[in-house]
Image (tube, coloured by chain):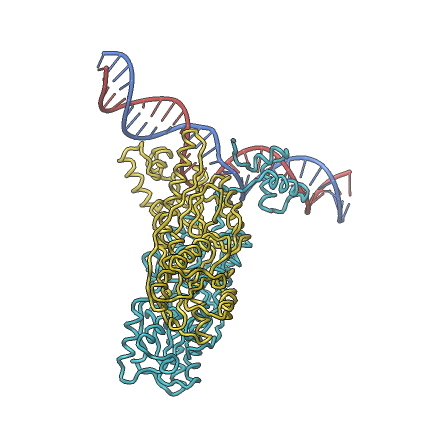
Chain colours: A cyan, B yellow, C red, D blue
Amino acid sequence: MKKRKPTIKDIARRLDISVSTVSRAIRGAEDINPMTKKKVLDLAEKIGYKKSVLAAGLASKKSYLIGVIIPELTVPFFGRVILGIEQFLKPLGYDLIIVHSDEQEQKEKECIDILLDRQVDGILISLSFNTKSDLHLKKAMEEEVPIVVFDRILPKSELPIPRVIVDDFEAGYQATNHLINKGYKRIAFISGPEDLYISQQRLKGYRTAMERNGFGTSADLIVPTLDLRRSVGQALDKLMVLKEKPDAIVALNDPIAFRVMRLLQKRGIEIPEKIAVMGISGDDMGELFNPSLTTINQPAQEMGFVAANLLIDRMNAMKDAKNQGKVFIPMAILKKLPISLIEREST
Amino acid sequence: MKKRKPTIKDIARRLDISVSTVSRAIRGAEDINPMTKKKVLDLAEKIGYKKSVLAAGLASKKSYLIGVIIPELTVPFFGRVILGIEQFLKPLGYDLIIVHSDEQEQKEKECIDILLDRQVDGILISLSFNTKSDLHLKKAMEEEVPIVVFDRILPKSELPIPRVIVDDFEAGYQATNHLINKGYKRIAFISGPEDLYISQQRLKGYRTAMERNGFGTSADLIVPTLDLRRSVGQALDKLMVLKEKPDAIVALNDPIAFRVMRLLQKRGIEIPEKIAVMGISGDDMGELFNPSLTTINQPAQEMGFVAANLLIDRMNAMKDAKNQGKVFIPMAILKKLPISLIEREST
DNA sequence: AGCGTTACCGGTAACGTTCTCGGTAATTTT
DNA sequence: AAAATTACCGAGAACGTTACCGGTAACGCT
C-alpha cells in the first residue's frame, strides 16, 4: 500500500539516464533525441508520473497560474470574459485562479495581495465599481507581475498598463442613436460612478448623440447609480418625479437595465410603449425578460481572449528584456473592441 | 535596482538566528519564544518578506489550494455557493481554484486532472447535468485528495464520499404543495436527466404531493429537459400539445423556470392567470422578472460553507489517520440542508 | 587532417521552505 | 542535589524540479 508518487528520478533510474534528460523530455525542451524523449514519455505515462507543479514552479520561478480579479462572480458578462481567457490560456498550460472584489476597492487590494502571495505569473483585472485609485496595481508592477486591465478601467491612469475595453463611447452613442431613430425624444441616461471610465465614455456617447440630433442634454435626464442593485431605485425615482418624464432610458449596463425594467413595471409603466429601456452588455439573460431587453453587445469572450493574449505578450516581453539584460519598459496599450446592437423588444 | 525578494534566510542572517527558527515564527508554530517570534515577524513585515507558497508547498506536501468544480460559471446559484466556500476557507489560508465543466462529463474529468496536477489539497465538486459515472471521483480518492460533492450528486454512488445537498424531495414536495394550496389542479413537472439525483428527488416530491392530494400523476405531465437552455422549449412543447393543458408548472430549477416563463409569454399565455410557474433555486434574479418567480430557496451560501467545512474535516481525519499509522477510511456522509418557500408573483 | 558545429546528454547547484532529530540551558520534580 | 522535564533553538537533509555549465561523439567543412 506504499504509494510514493513517481518522480523524474525514478524515471531516470529505470531508463538509466540523467534527471536532466528526463526533465528535458517532460517539459518538452529541444536539445533532446526524439527517441529518448519518446521513451521517457512512454514510461512516464505507464507508471503514472505526474509533474509536480510546485517543484517545477519553485525551480523555474514560474507558477503557471494566472490570477483573474472580477468585481462579481454572478455577473454574466464576466463569466463570458473568463471563457475567453481560458480559451487562450489553457492551451498554454496556465490555470486560472479567480477571485472577486465584491465591488469594493478594499477587497480588490486584498485580492491583489492574495494573488501576489500565490506568485501568479500575471494578473487580469476588471476594476470594481468603487475603485478610485490604482495604487494596488502599481504594487503588482513593482513585483514584476504583468497586469492587464479589462472592461472596467480607470479614466486617467498614468500607469503604463495595457488595457482592453470596448468602444464605450460608441456604445453610448449607438444606444442613444438607436432610441432616437425609433422616435424617442426625451431620453434619460443612468450612469455610474464618476471615476469609472466606462461610465464617463458611455455618457459622453449619449451626450454626443443627443446633441447631434438637436435634443440637447438636460442635466435632469442624467442620473447616477452607485451600484448595480440598491441605488438603481433612487436613480429611477429622480427621473420619475420630473415634470416631463423621459420616454426612454439608457442604462449603463444590462444588470441595471433589468432592474429599471422591473421597477417601471411595478409602477405600471409599459415598456416600450410608455418608456423604452436599453442596456449595454449583451447578456443572454436579456432575452428572457418580458419584454426582452434591447442592448449593445460587448464581445465579452473576445475581450477575455484579447486580454489574455496581451498579458502573455507582456510576460514574454518582460522575459526577453531580462534575458538581454535590458530594463523592461512597461507600456500603456489601449485596445478597443467593436460593439454591435442587439435589437429586442424593450425599445 | 537589484531587488531579489527577501527569504527566510535573509531574515535569519540579519537576526543571527537559524532558518528553522524563522520558519517556526512565520508559519506560527509553537515551540518558539514569543519574543523571537515577534522580532522575526516585525522584520519580515519591515523588509516586505513574502512566504513562497511554492516552496512551502513543496516541502510540506501541501498546496493550500482547494479546487472547485462547477458546471457553469454564470449560474447564480453556484456563485452563491462559492461565496460560502470562500467564507469558510479563506480564514484558514486556503485559496480557491475554480474550474467549470460546461455541463459535460468529459470536461469534468479534465477538470479533475487539472486539479490533481495542481496538487490541490481537496476538491469540491458539483456534478454536471450529464455526468453518469463517478469514476473520475474515484481517481481523486486514489490520489488521496479528499473530495466533497455538493448539490448535484449521483443517486446511487457506492463511493464513500461526503455529500451536501438540500432536501430535494422536500423542495419538490413543497413547490407542488404550494401550487395545490393556491388552487391549481393540473400541475406539470419539468425534470432533468434521469441519473441526476436532484431531478429524481424533486420529481419524487412532486409525485408524492400530487398523490397525497388525490390528483394522481399522469405521465403526460412529466417532461424532461436535458439541459438548461435549448431543450427547455421541446419540453414545454410536449406540455402544450396536450388536450388538457396544465395550469401550473414546476421547473427543476430557476434557470429553467425563467425560460419557461419566457416561452409561455411568447405564446401569449398569462402568468399566473393561465399557467403558474415555480422554480427551485432561490436565485435573486427571479425577483426581476415580470411576474417575479415564486421559488424554493436553497441555502446556497450555507451549502458552500458546510461543504467546505466537511472537506476540511475529511482532510484532518486523513492526516490524523496517517500520523497514527492507521488506514484512512473514507466515509459516505449525506448532509441535507433545509429549504424554504419564497412566494412571489408567478403563482 | 584539423577545426568548428551540431546534437545530445550528465552533474550539480540552486529554488525557499519544512521536518526530523538532536542539543543546550533553564526549570521543575523527586 | 540529582534527575527529569521543559522551552527553545540549530544543523542539515529532504521536497521535485529546472538552470547552467560542460563534455563527448559524430558530422561537415576547408
Side (left or right) of B180 relative to A3? left
In front of the other: D11 or B63? B63
- Quarter of image, res A32: top right
In front of the other: A83 or C15? A83
Q: Residue at x 55, y 52 (%)?
A: B106
- Measuring from the top left, give residue B225's x and y in whole percent: 50, 61
- Measuring from the top left, give residue B334's x and y in whole percent: 40, 45
Indicate the quadrant containing the C terminus of chain B: top left, top right, bottom left or bottom right. Answer: bottom left
Side (left or right) of A317 relative to B85? right
| Residue A121 can be seen, yes or no | no
- Quarter of image, res B341: bottom left
| Residue A225 can be seen, yes or no | yes
Which residue is outermost to the bottom?
Answer: A214
Location of residue C6 with respect to A316 vertically, above or below = above
Side (left or right) of A321 relative to A37? left
- Measuring from the top left, give residue B184's x and y in whole percent: 38, 67
Side (left or right) of A144 relative to B226? left
